[in-house]
Image (cartoon, rainbow, N blue to C red):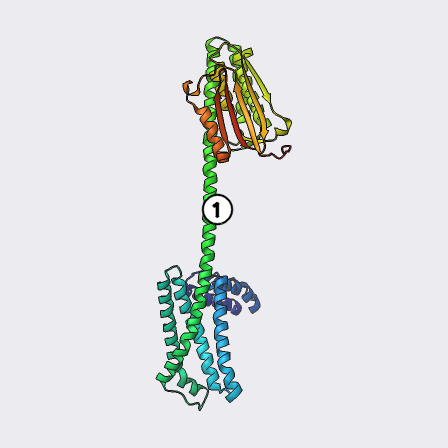
């Protein structure tokens, strides 16, 4: 019973101290048997209360604060030692002098905190504000310490039973103030340098974080732009294809309409699963075009002829997905659809140094682009996507000829994992 009471008593005291520290913590005394030993009671109740107390009042110092504290302590310790050495060497320092110097050094450490606080609080201000704050703090700390030393001089003499002659209060305070101003000014200058370096590092980190955030925002905006352009293509493509299916139904060509709808389903399943901003090997992009042209071949039959020319070395060259489809759509819509004659669409990939060149041409009627009806999304979309991906290095050139239309896309030659032969 006595051990259990002792544990509860210790817990109550620590709970009270924790509440005084400003962090109220519930303490539950551990129940102990009547036969429990004092050691058992302490092992059950004391560690819990100690952890609660430590959690409530412990405030770990930052590395820069520890560095500043170490600087202050080292400065005052060195100052005290250098002051006492001549006394010990030449005249033998009395206990009174030693205690007085220790008193000044201890109080100097504490008052240096005020100087540091003033420097830190004004570190983001202009030079006039910072110098004024540091000067005021240095003068106040020096005057305070000089008055403390002068006021405690007689008391220290009685404490150590010294016969040392003590200077008058005003003289001692004045002499100490003159010496201490230089000491605190030196510390203030050191604090200013430390805080300036710290502020410079913080600004570098803030600038780096801002740059990273801007980079992420730019990447997100670019991805959103590419996604918008890519999803702009899908309705455009669907509009044309569904119109074709509708035309087949109107002409009662149900078999062709059913085949075209099945191919459309396969095409959408294969293409819509890809990322809007992804770069694909040219080989895959051409395969996608072949799927699309299979859909159109149901509608146009033998009137549509397609030729693909791509050197094996360029199969792994990376291009934005769906980049070429609007050009093929334009050829079908403006060259093949209005004509009763067969039309050949050619897609040719080549290399010009570090540039990938892809040409899409048809031998249709060759109407001027400005004179062609429609929304004009295709050509503009390709240009926008090239500009978003590659900037000035991505271009689209269009030419109208006597018979046919030619579009040439130029973009930097980038390699997939499989690589592109040199």
Please, is residue 1 above or below residue 229 in the view? Answer: below
* Residue 377: % across, % down: 44, 24
Q: Is residue 103 above or below residue 194?
A: below
Which residue appears farthest toward the front when viewing the image? 402
Name the secondary structure under disc 1: helix
Q: Which quadrant of the rendered structure holds the C terminus?
A: top right
| 176, 346: nearer the viewer | 346
Residue 37: x, y in percent? 57, 68
Residue 182 position (above or below residue 328): below
Which residue is most to the bottom? Answer: 163
297 and 19: which one is in front?
297
Tell me which residue sits at (45%, 76%) in the image.
Answer: 106
Res 210 visible: yes
User: What is the x, y in percent for residue 331?
Assistant: 50, 18
Q: Which residue is mark 1?
A: 212
Residue sitting at x 47%, y 39%: 220
Residue 117: quadrant of the picture: bottom left
Residue visible at 41% across and 84% down in the picture: 153
Q: Residue 22 lies in what quarter of the image? A: bottom left
Callout 1 crowding tier (Cα within 10 Å): few <14, some 14–19, many ≥20: few
Instruction: Say which residue appears at 50% left-offset and 17% top-offset.
Output: 404
In this orientation, does residue 15 appear?
no
- Expressed as whole percent of the image width and height from the top left, the position of residue 5 reads 49, 68
Q: Is residue 317 left or right of residue 339?
A: right
């Amino acid at each position: 019973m006595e051990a259990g009471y002792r544990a509860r008593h210790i817990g109550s005291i620590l709970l009270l101290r924790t509440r005084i520290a400003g962090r109220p913590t519930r303490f539950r005394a551990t129940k102990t048997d009547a036969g429990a030993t004092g050691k058992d009671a302490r092992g059950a109740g004391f560690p819990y209360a100690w952890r609660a107390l430590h959690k409530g009042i412990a405030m770990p110092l930052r590395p820069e604060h520890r560095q500043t504290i170490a600087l202050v302590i080292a400065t005052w310790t060195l100052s005290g030692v250098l002051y006492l050495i001549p006394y010990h060497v030449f005249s033998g320092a009395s206990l009174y002098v030693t205690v007085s110097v220790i008193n000044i050094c201890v109080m100097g450490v504490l008052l240096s905190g005020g100087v540091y606080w003033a420097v830190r609080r004004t570190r983001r201000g202009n030079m006039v504000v910072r110098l004024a704050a540091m000067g005021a703090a240095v003068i106040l700390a020096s005057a305070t310490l000089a008055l403390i030393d002068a006021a405690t001089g007689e008391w220290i003499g009685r404490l150590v039973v010294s016969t040392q002659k003590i200077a008058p209060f005003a003289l001692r305070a004045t002499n100490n103030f003159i010496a201490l101003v230089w000491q605190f000014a030196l510390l203030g200058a050191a604090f200013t340098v430390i805080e300036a370096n710290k502020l410079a590092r913080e600004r570098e980190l803030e600038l780096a974080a801002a740059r990273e955030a801007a980079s992420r925002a730019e990447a997100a905006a670019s991805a959103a732009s590419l996604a918008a352009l890519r999803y702009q293509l899908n309705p455009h493509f669907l509009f044309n294809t569904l119109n074709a299916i509708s035309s087949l139904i109107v002409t009662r060509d149900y078999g062709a309409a059913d085949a075209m709808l099945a191919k459309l389903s396969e095409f959408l399943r294969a293409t819509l699963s890809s990322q809007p901003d992804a770069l694909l090997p040219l080989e895959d992009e051409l395969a996608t075009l072949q799927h699309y042209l299979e859909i159109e071949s149901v509608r146009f039959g033998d009137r549509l002829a397609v030729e693909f020319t791509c050197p094996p070395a360029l199969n792994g060259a990376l291009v934005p997905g769906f980049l070429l489809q609007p050009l093929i759509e334009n050829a079908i819509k403006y060259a093949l659809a209005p004509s009763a004659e067969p039309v050949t669409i050619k897609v040719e990939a080549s290399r010009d140094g570090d540039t990938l060149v892809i040409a899409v041409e048809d031998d249709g009627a060759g109407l001027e682009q400005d004179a062609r009806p429609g929304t004009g999304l295709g050509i503009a979309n390709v240009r926008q996507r090239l500009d978003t991906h590659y900037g000035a290095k991505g271009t689209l050139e269009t030419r109208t000829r006597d018979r046919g239309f030619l579009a040439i896309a130029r973009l930097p030659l980038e390699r997939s994992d499989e690589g592109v032969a040199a």
